[in-house]
Amino acid sequence: MKIGIGLPNQVRDVDPRVIPEWSVRSEEAGFSTLATVGRTAYPGIMDTVALAGAAAATRTIGLSSNIMLATVWPPVLLAKELAGIDGMSGGRLTLGVGIGGNRPDDFVVDGLAPEGLGKRMDRDLDIYHRVWRGEPVGEGVNAAVPSGTRAVPLLFGGLAPVAFRRMAAWGQGYVAGSLPAPAVEPYFDAARRAWEEKGREGAPKLVAIAYFAFGDVRRGKDNIRDYYAAIGAEYADSVAESISVGGDAVRAAAEAFAAIGADELIFHPALADPDEIEKLAGAVL
């Protein structure tokens, strides 16, 4: 199982200047992937901006999102930005997407309300691929992306049966929510079944995520609780209290997710302190 690390773009009032340093140090430490967690209505750094900064600062580490709320974006604009990030990185981007909707304040674009999100996602996926193929956009004859642009590989999150069917139809794999391994296992099984039912060869890539902290644990838990507060206090408390604290806890989390067949585990930071990178690396790499 590969071990990746999240960018701290979701930490309240994070200093944007930490993103390039965090990216370089994570690559030097040997993590497989740099990933974002993000939303619009929160004082952090937008996923696309953080990923672009990471792409420019690094050379080999993978880039991903866990997960991007794709339906808050106009699809042509998002597809163009993603193509640029992927191209800048030399083809290192794998995008994790979901429909969102449980936090309506994220939907700030006129005409893109938090309604009919499944149908919108299906429509947008088709638009993404038409953009990436270089088909004309708008009323003119020009493509939105340079020739040679590739289709960005997609991973899907979500818990509803349609999310797994969408993953099997469009994606390369599945990203689980921030839950302990025993709770994630049924969703991994559902992803495998949907893949098989669709007649796809091989197996879906299965990605798990977990939060971690080594330093100021109380502050880290408060950061996570604050980030998820819009969903509800009970859920926010459960995520905050499930943070893997210290070396023994992150190793136990890695063992638990490996045991249920995760292909990659992304540890997302509860703190925006770059020294957390080497502490995590020393524990699990």
Image (tube, grey):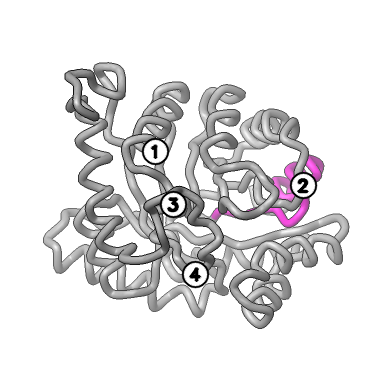
Q: Residue furthest left?
A: 199
Q: Residue at x 75, y 44 (%)?
A: 14
Task: Give the class, few, some or many, for how many residues have Cα within 10 Å of label 2's Cα (few <14, many ≥20).
Answer: few
User: Pointer 2: what residue?
Assistant: 13
Q: Nearer the viewer, mark 2 or mark 3?
A: 3
Label 3 element class: helix
Circle nearer the N terminus (4, 1): 1
User: Pointer 3: what residue?
Assistant: 72
User: Pointer 1: what residue?
Assistant: 78
Q: Is residue 139 left or right of residue 66?
A: left
Query: x, y (%) of residue 23?
Result: 65, 33
Q: Is residue 280 magenta?
A: yes
Q: Residue at x 26, y 48 (%)?
A: 125
Query: x, y (%) of residue 279?
Result: 78, 48
Task: Kindly identify the amino acid type of the residue bearing the numbered disc 2.
Answer: Asp
Circle nearer the N terminus (1, 3): 3
Mark 2 and mark 3 in contact? Answer it, CB < 8 Å.
no
| 87 relative to 213, above or below | above
Task: Give the class, few, some or many, for how many residues have Cα within 10 Å of label 1's Cα (few <14, many ≥20).
Answer: some
Q: CA distance from mark 4 to mark 1?
A: 21 Å
